[in-house]
Amino acid sequence: MNTRLQVLKTYKIYINGQFPRTESGRTYVATNAKGDMLANVCLSSRKDFRDAVVAARGAFGGWSGRAAFNRGQILYRIAEMLEGRKAQFVEELIMQGSSTKAATAEVEQSIDRLIYYSGWCDKYQQVFSSVNPVASSHFNFSVLEPMGVVAVIAPQQSSLIGLVSIIAPIIAGGNSCVVLASEDKPLCSVTFAEVLHSSDLPGGVVNILTGKSKELLPYFADHMDVNATCYCGDDAAAVKLIREKASLNVKRVIVYADKKWENDSTQSPYFINDFQEVKTTWHPIENIGGGKAGY
């Protein structure tokens, strides 16, 4: 009787809606807490990051221009696809050291978090925009606009919930992003890219790389076509480096240190607001026939 050999999964990166191998051809070994090998994972290079930024920039215009309710529909669809592959994510989390109970809770919370942000897509403007009082015959409106391309160093201690918690508010607000997944727990990030690929999310809106943060961090911070860099961690030296390099083109820097992404306090429309810019518009008021003010 022949023993069938299992087809092992190949963990690739995700750029522009496709799953290439890193251009450098390098890999590293992901292991569990016992040191057992889990998979060979792509060790992304600077070229991979540059390709991902090009993809994110190309996707930004179409994504930010979509109706807010449509972005909400797509985030909901991502949650649906994640629900359908729940067992696979639970298995990968267990492989990386979680208990069955903790793994199940993390996947379910990730699904719920996507639903949460899908509901905010067409509501955050109402909360954070305003009509401003001015001492002249003008209407003055402040509204939010997405920053553009966001480079993200995802939470390193979390495989799935941290990744979802940072991607969801960024794309809910109309941005595109390039995300460096957890170095030690990368499996769910690649599988989540497969979920994105099978949803209605356009290619290039989310790009996911795997590799070493110390190698890629300077490029995430100083690329001239990145509008904001988000760092999820508490390494003071890394934060200092990001702030220094981000000053080259005055990109925004958002730092989330010591966040417990499994807590409900880490889901809020304010996370959407963090990746928005305020646009103020003036509109003159004309007096028609000396009567009421009108446009």
Image (cartoon, rainbow, N blue to C red):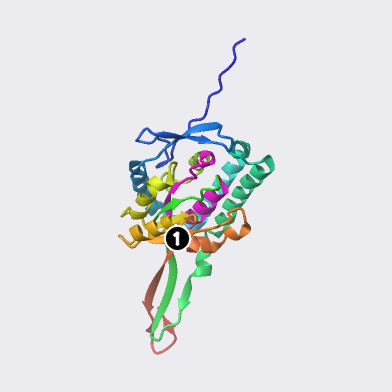
Q: Quadrant of the C terminus?
A: bottom left
Residue at horizontal 59%, vertical 49%?
Answer: 110
Q: Where is residue 184 in the image (x, y as percent from the top left)?
A: 51, 42
Residue at horizontal 48%, vertical 40%?
Answer: 197
- Does residue 267 sit above or below 26 in this rendering? below
Residue that mark 1 sits on = 254
User: What residue type is disc 1 on?
Assistant: Ile
Seen from the viewer's position, the closer of residues 257 and 54 is 257
Residue 65 visible in the picture = no
* Residue furthest bottom as drawn: 290
In the figure, is residue 78 to the left or right of 147? Answer: right
In the figure, is residue 27 to the left or right of 270? Answer: left
Q: Quadrant of the N terminus?
A: top right
Residue at horizontal 54%, vertical 53%?
Answer: 165
Q: Where is residue 146 in the image (x, y as percent from the top left)?
A: 42, 60
- Does residue 83 sit above or below 292 in this rendering? above
Question: Residue 243 occupies which quadrant of the picture?
Answer: bottom left
Pointer 1 local density, CA inside 10 Å: few below 14, some 14–19, many at least 20 = some
Q: Position of residue 6 (x, y in %)?
A: 56, 22
Q: Position of residue 111 (x, y in %)?
A: 60, 48
* Residue furthest right as drawn: 101
Seen from the viewer's position, the closer of residues 216 and 132 is 216
The magenta stretch is 160-189
Give the structural element (helix, strand or loop) at label 1: strand
Residue 151 visible in the picture = yes
Q: Does the magenta stretch include residue 273?
A: no
- Does residue 254 sit above or below 3 in this rendering? below
Q: Does the magenta stretch include residue 176?
A: yes
- Does residue 247 sit above or below 130 in this rendering? above
Marks counted in the figure total: 1
